[in-house]
C-alpha cells in the first residue's frame, strides 16, 4: 500500500471510546470530499448557479470541487503535525530535525499551502493529462487552481497566510512532500476530472472565480464540519484502496447530511392570497405586494408605510411569491434588536409552514439568530421537538408549529443555513466583515430573500455595511425587502444607488415624495426603478397634537394630571440618568409607588425580562382598563425599540424627528373601546392623542447653547442641536404629527440638504462637527469591510481578519467603549456566585453593559481576599474571562437594584 497511509488525520480524544484510535489522513480527506460532493450535487440550484456563472457544466464543477476539497488537509502531512500523536505517525524518520508544531503561526491549514506548492509540479501534469502548456500557461493554470486551493485550505473559517512559505520547510521531512504528492496524484486517478483548461488560462475567468470563491470557502467549512463528525465517519486505521473507501465515505456522508436537513431542498407551497394565508382583507400595501409583477433577476423592494399598515405581512407575501417563482428557497427576517427579533420569531413561526415544506411532509427548520436565543422558550421548544434523526419517534408525526434541526440550532454560525431564519440584522451584516466563519454566513444567505425591518434605525456605520451587503447579495442573485416608516429621501436614494451600482447601471433619481410608497428596483436596464404611491387605511391614519413643555416641573404637572384622571402615562427620556431623575421625582409623589415603573438598558437581563413582562401587562395590547389606570412608565429609547406598548398620554424629551415619530407610534397604538379594552380597528374612545414635547423655549435666532443650557444630556447624545431645532420648528408650524399625511414633510424638514442649509449660524459649527464625524464613521466602516470584489477569498481581502474568540468586531458604531460587567454575590461560604441563580443561563442573566471610562473603570475592584473566588468562578464559567467581575454590595460609589438598575450610589434606592 502507498506510504501515505502511514499518516493520521484525526485522533481519538477519549481513549475509552470504542473503535480505532486514529483515522487515517487519506480517509478523513475523502470523508470531507464526499460531503462536498453531495453538497455540490449537479442538480442543486447553488451548483447550477455557480456553474452557469463560471460557464462550465454542473457535473464538471462538482468533480473539480471534490478533487480540491480532498486536498483540504494537505498540511497534515507535515511531520510537525503528525508528531502531535506520535503513535499514529508511522512514517517518522528524523524527529530531531523537525520543529515542534506551531498552532498559531504555522497551523496545518497554512502548512497545506506550502505542501501544495511543493506538490504542484508533480500533480499538474496529471491534471492536464495529455494537454501541453507553455511555462506561462502552466503558471496561469496554477494561479487559477490556487484560488480554489485558498478556499479549501481556509476550511477553519479564516483565509490562510501565503507569506514566506519557505519558512515552513523546517516543519516537514522530505518524504512528507513525496507522500502528499503521491496522494494528490492518486486522487486525480480516483476522480478523473476534466479541467476547463482554456478558461483557467483566462484572467476574466479567474476574476469570476474569485467573485464566487466566498461560496466555495463556505462550502469547505461546512463540509469539514460535517465530515469530521465521528458519529457518522467512524475511525479507520487499516489501509484499503482509495476507491473502496470512497464508496463507504459517500454512504456515510449521505447519513451525516440527513442529520442536518441540508440534503433536502425545501418545497415551496403555492401562494394563494393575503386573505387565504392571513385571514383578513389586504391593506393597500399588501394588495400591492400580492399583485406587483415579479421578475427572475435580483430585486430590491423598499416599503414605506405607517405603523400598523401590515408591512410584515406584505413582506412575507412578496417573499412567498418570489420563492414560488423559483428565485429563492428561503428567507431571513432581520430586526434591530433581540427583543423585536423574539417577537417576530413568534409571528413567522406561526406562518412559515404555509410557505414551504420538506419532502414527505417533514417540517423545515426555522432558526432564531441572536446572542440570547437559547433563552427564548419557543425556540428551545422547536429544537427539542426536532430531535436527532435516529430518535425513538418519527419527526413526521409531530404537529408542532415550528421545528429546528438540532445540528442547525447548536451554533449561530450555522443559523443562516436554515431555510427560514429570524434574528438581528447584525447576524447578516457579519457576512461582509472579516470575522472567522464569515464565508459560512454568506453561504447561508445564498438563494434567500433578506427582509430587514426598521431599516431607518441604522446608523451611518451600519448603513455603510448594509450597502456592501446589498451589493454582495445582488451578486449572489438574491433579493432584498426593506421595511421602514421614517426613511429619508437621501437614505432611500443611497439604497437605490447601491443596488443599481451592483447591477452596473447608472443611478436614477428617485422623484416621488408620496407616502406610503413602494419602491421597486431591478436590474432591467430599460426601466430599473418603479415608484408606486399607495393609499392608507383610515384606521392607521392618525393625528397627534404636539404640546410644548419647557421645564421638568411642567412635565411633572402634566403627568400627575393624567394620573389623577385615571390615564396611563409614558415619559420617554433621552438618557438613563435623566430617566432615573424623573423616576425618583414621580415615584416619591405617587400614592402607590409601585404604580411607577422604570425601564432602561442598564438592567441585568433577568430583571429586564421581568420589566418587559410587567410593562406589557400594564401597557400592552391585552391590558384592560383596571391594569392601566393611573400607571406611569419612565423609559429611555429602548421603549420604542422593543415593546409593543400603548400609552394614553405620552411625554417625550426632544429627539431627532424620526425617533420622535417612532415614539409617537406608542401613543394610542392599540384602538380601545369605551371600556378601555383593545378592539381591532374600532373608533378609539379616548380623547384625541396629545404628545407633550419636553424641549427648550423656542427661539427663532437661538444661541449656540440653546439646547445645552437646560438639556445637556440630550446634546451629549444627539450632538447636532441644529437638527433638533429644525424638527421643533416644523412641529411648531404643523402643530401636530399627522400620519401618513405629514410623514415625508416631517422627515425632509430635517434631513434634506435644503433644510440642513437653514440651521442657525450659531449652531453651524456643531453641525459641521456632526457631519465630519458622520463621514469619519462611514470611512471607518469602509475600512473594516472585506473587499469581496477585487481579491476573492484570501487574507488580502481585508486589513485585519479577526478570530472572534479573541477580538470582537462590531456591526454598530459607538464612540464610547463599553464593557460587559458580571454582577456577583458573596455566598455564606465565602464564594462568589452570579447575581442571578439559574441552572442554565446564570451568566447571561447577570450581565450588564456599561461605558468603560464613565463607569466600568470606576467600579470597586473585588477585594484581595476574594481573588481566589474570582479565579474559581472563571474556571467554572470560561466565558467570563474577558468580563469585569463586580460585587455591588461592596462598592461605595455604584449600586444595583432590581427597581432602578445600575446607578450611582447617591441615587436614591427604593
Image (tube, helix red, strand yellow):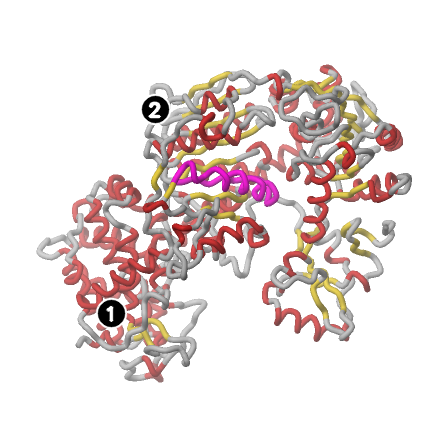
Give the percent coordinates (x, y) of residue 141. 21, 52
Q: Is residue 344 left or right of residue 246?
A: right
The reply to whether callout 1 and callout 2 are in contact (CB within 8 Å) is no
Write down the residue under mark 2: 524
* Magenta segment includes 347: yes
Query: Quick check: can you spot residue 282?
Result: yes
**Mark 1, secondary structure of its residue:** helix
Outermost residue toward the left? 130
**Residue 636 relative to residue 100: left or right:** right
Characterize the local packing of mark 2: few (<14), some (14-19) or many (20 or more) Cα atoms within 10 angstroms.
some
Residue at coordinates 24% horizontally, 45% vertically from top-left? 43
Q: Which mark is residue 775?
A: none
The majority secondary structure of the magenta stretch comes to helix
The answer to which of marks 1 and 2 sits earlier in the sequence is: 1
- Which of the two marks, 1 or 2, is nearer to us in this view? 2
Task: Give me the residue at 30% from left, 61% from top.
Answer: 32
Report which quarter residue 100 is drawn in: bottom left
Q: Nearer the viewer, residue 806 or 478?
A: 478
Which residue has dot 1 on it?
180
**Position above or below: 261 against 507:** below
Looking at the image, residue 711 lies above or below residue 172 = above
Question: Which stretch did the figure color magenta?
Answer: 330-356
Q: How many marks do you count on the picture? A: 2
Is residue 161 at all visible to an observer of this figure?
no
Quarter of the image that includes the N terminus: bottom left
Amino acid at each position: 500500500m502507498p506510504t501515505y497511509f502511514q499518516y493520521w488525520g484525526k485522533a481519538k480524544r477519549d481513549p475509552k471510546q470504542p473503535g480505532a484510535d486514529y483515522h487515517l489522513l487519506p480517509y478523513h480527506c475523502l470523508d470531507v470530499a464526499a460531503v462536498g460532493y453531495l453538497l455540490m450535487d449537479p442538480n442543486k440550484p447553488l451548483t447550477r448557479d455557480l456553474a452557469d456563472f463560471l460557464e462550465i457544466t454542473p457535473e464538471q464543477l462538482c468533480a473539480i470541487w471534490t478533487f480540491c476539497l480532498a486536498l483540504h488537509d494537505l498540511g497534515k502531512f507535515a511531520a510537525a503535525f503528525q508528531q502531535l500523536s506520535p503513535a499514529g505517525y508511522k512514517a517518522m524518520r528524523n524527529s530531531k530535525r523537525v520543529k515542534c508544531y506551531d498552532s498559531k503561526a504555522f497551523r496545518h491549514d497554512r502548512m497545506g499551502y506550502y505542501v501544495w506548492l511543493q506538490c504542484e509540479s508533480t500533480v499538474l501534469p496529471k491534471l492536464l493529462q495529455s494537454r501541453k502548456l507553455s511555462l506561462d500557461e502552466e503558471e496561469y493554470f496554477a494561479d487559477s487552481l490556487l484560488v480554489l486551493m485558498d478556499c479549501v485550505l481556509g476550511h477553519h473559517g479564516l483565509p490562510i497566510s501565503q507569506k514566506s512559505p519557505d519558512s515552513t520547510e523546517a516543519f516537514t521531512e522530505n518524504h512528507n512532500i513525496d507522500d502528499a504528492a503521491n496522494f494528490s496524484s492518486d486522487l486525480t486517478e480516483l476522480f478523473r476530472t476534466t479541467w476547463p483548461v482554456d478558461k483557467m488560462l483566462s484572467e476574466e475567468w479567474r476574476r469570476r472565480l474569485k467573485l464566487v470563491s466566498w461560496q466555495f470557502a463556505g462550502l469547505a467549512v461546512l463540509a469539514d464540519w460535517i465530515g469530521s463528525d465521528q458519529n457518522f465517519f467512524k475511525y479507520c486505521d487499516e489501509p484499503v484502496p482509495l476507491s473502496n473507501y470512497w464508496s463507504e465515505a459517500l454512504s456515510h456522508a449521505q447519513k451525516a447530511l440527513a442529520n442536518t436537513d441540508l440534503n433536502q431542498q425545501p418545497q415551496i407551497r403555492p401562494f394563494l392570497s393575503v386573505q387565504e394565508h392571513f385571514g383578513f382583507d389586504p391593506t393597500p400595501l399588501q394588495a400591492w405586494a400580492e399583485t406587483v409583477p415579479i421578475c427572475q433577476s435580483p430585486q430590491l423592494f423598499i416599503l414605506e408605510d405607517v405603523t400598523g399598515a401590515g408591512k410584515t405581512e406584505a413582506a412575507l407575501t412578496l417573499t412567498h411569491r418570489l420563492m414560488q417563482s423559483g428565485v429563492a428557497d428561503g428567507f431571513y427576517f432581520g430586526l434591530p434588536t433581540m427583543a423585536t427579533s423574539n417577537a417576530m420569531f413568534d409571528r413567522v413561526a406561526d406562518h412559515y409552514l404555509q410557505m414551504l415544506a420538506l419532502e414527505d411532509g417533514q417540517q423545515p427548520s426555522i432558526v432564531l439568530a441572536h446572542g440570547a436565543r437559547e433563552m427564548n422558550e419557543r425556540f428551545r421548544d422547536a429544537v427539542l421537538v426536532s430531535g436527532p434523526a435516529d430518535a425513538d419517534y418519527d419527526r413526521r408525526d409531530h404537529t408542532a408549529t415550528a421545528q429546528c434541526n438540532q445540528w442547525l440550532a447548536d451554533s449561530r454560525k450555522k443559523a443562516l443555513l436554515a431555510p427560514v431564519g429570524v434574528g438581528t440584522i447584525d447576524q447578516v451584516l457579519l457576512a461582509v466583515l472579516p470575522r472567522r466563519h464569515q464565508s459560512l454566513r454568506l453561504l447561508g444567505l445564498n438563494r434567500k430573500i433578506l427582509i430587514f425591518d426598521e431599516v431607518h434605525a441604522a446608523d451611518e456605520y451600519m448603513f455603510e455595511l448594509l450597502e456592501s451587503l446589498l451589493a454582495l447579495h445582488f451578486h449572489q442573485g438574491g433579493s432584498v425587502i426593506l421595511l421602514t416608516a421614517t426613511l429619508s429621501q437621501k437614505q432611500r436614494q443611497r439604497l437605490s444607488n447601491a443596488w443599481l451600482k451592483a447591477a452596473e447601471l447608472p443611478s436614477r433619481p428617485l422623484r416621488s415624495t408620496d407616502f406610503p410608497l413602494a419602491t421597486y428596483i431591478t436590474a432591467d436596464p430599460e426601466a430599473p426603478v418603479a415608484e408606486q404611491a399607495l393609499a392608507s387605511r383610515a384606521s392607521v391614519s392618525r393625528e397627534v397634537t404636539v404640546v410644548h413643555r419647557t421645564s421638568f416641573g411642567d412635565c411633572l404637572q402634566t403627568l400627575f394630571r393624567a394620573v389623577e384622571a385615571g390615564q396611563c402615562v409614558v415619559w420617554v427620556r433621552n438618557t438613563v440618568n435623566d430617566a432615573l431623575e424623573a423616576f425618583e421625582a414621580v415615584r416619591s409623589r405617587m400614592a402607590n409607588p409601585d404604580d411607577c415603573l422604570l425601564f432602561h438598558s442598564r438592567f441585568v437581563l433577568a430583571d429586564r425580562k421581568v420589566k418587559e413582562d410587567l410593562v406589557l401587562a400594564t401597557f400592552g395590547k391585552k391590558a384592560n382598563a383596571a391594569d392601566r389606570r393611573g400607571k406611569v412608565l419612565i423609559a429611555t429609547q429602548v421603549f420604542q425599540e422593543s415593546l409593543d406598548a400603548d400609552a394614553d398620554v405620552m411625554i417625550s424629551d426632544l429627539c431627532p424627528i424620526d425617533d420622535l415619530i417612532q415614539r409617537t407610534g406608542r401613543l394610542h397604538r392599540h384602538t380601545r373601546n369605551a371600556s378601555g379594552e383593545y378592539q381591532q380597528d374600532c373608533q378609539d374612545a379616548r380623547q384625541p392623542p396629545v404628545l407633550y414635547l419636553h424641549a427648550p423655549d423656542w427661539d427663532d435666532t437661538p444661541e449656540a447653547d440653546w439646547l445645552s443650557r437646560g438639556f445637556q444630556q440630550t446634546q451629549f447624545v444627539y450632538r447636532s442641536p441644529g437638527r433638533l431645532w429644525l424638527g421643533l420648528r416644523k412641529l411648531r408650524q404643523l402643530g401636530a404629527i399627522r400620519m401618513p399625511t405629514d410623514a415625508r414633510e416631517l422627515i425632509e424638514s430635517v434631513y434634506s440638504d435644503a433644510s440642513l442649509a437653514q440651521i442657525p449660524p450659531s449652531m453651524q459649527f456643531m453641525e459641521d462637527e456632526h457631519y465630519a464625524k458622520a463621514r469619519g464613521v462611514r470611512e471607518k466602516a469602509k475600512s473594516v469591510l472585506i473587499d469581496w470584489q477585487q481579491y476573492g477569498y484570501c487574507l488580502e481581502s481585508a486589513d485585519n481578519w479577526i478570530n472572534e474568540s479573541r477580538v470582537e468586531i462590531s456591526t454598530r458604531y459607538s464612540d464610547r467603549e463599553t464593557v460587559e460587567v458580571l454582577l456577583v454575590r458573596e455566598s455564606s461560604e465565602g464564594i462568589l456566585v452570579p447575581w442571578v441563580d439559574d441552572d442554565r443561563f446564570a451568566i447571561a442573566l447577570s450581565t450588564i453593559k456599561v461605558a468603560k471610562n464613565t463607569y466600568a473603570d470606576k467600579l470597586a475592584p473585588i477585594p484581595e481576599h476574594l481573588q481566589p473566588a474570582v479565579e474559581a468562578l472563571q474556571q467554572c464559567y470560561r466565558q467570563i474571562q474577558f468580563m469585569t467581575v463586580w460585587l455591588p454590595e461592596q462598592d461605595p460609589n455604584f449600586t444595583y437594584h432590581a427597581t432602578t438598575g445600575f446607578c450611582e450610589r447617591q441615587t436614591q434606592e427604593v
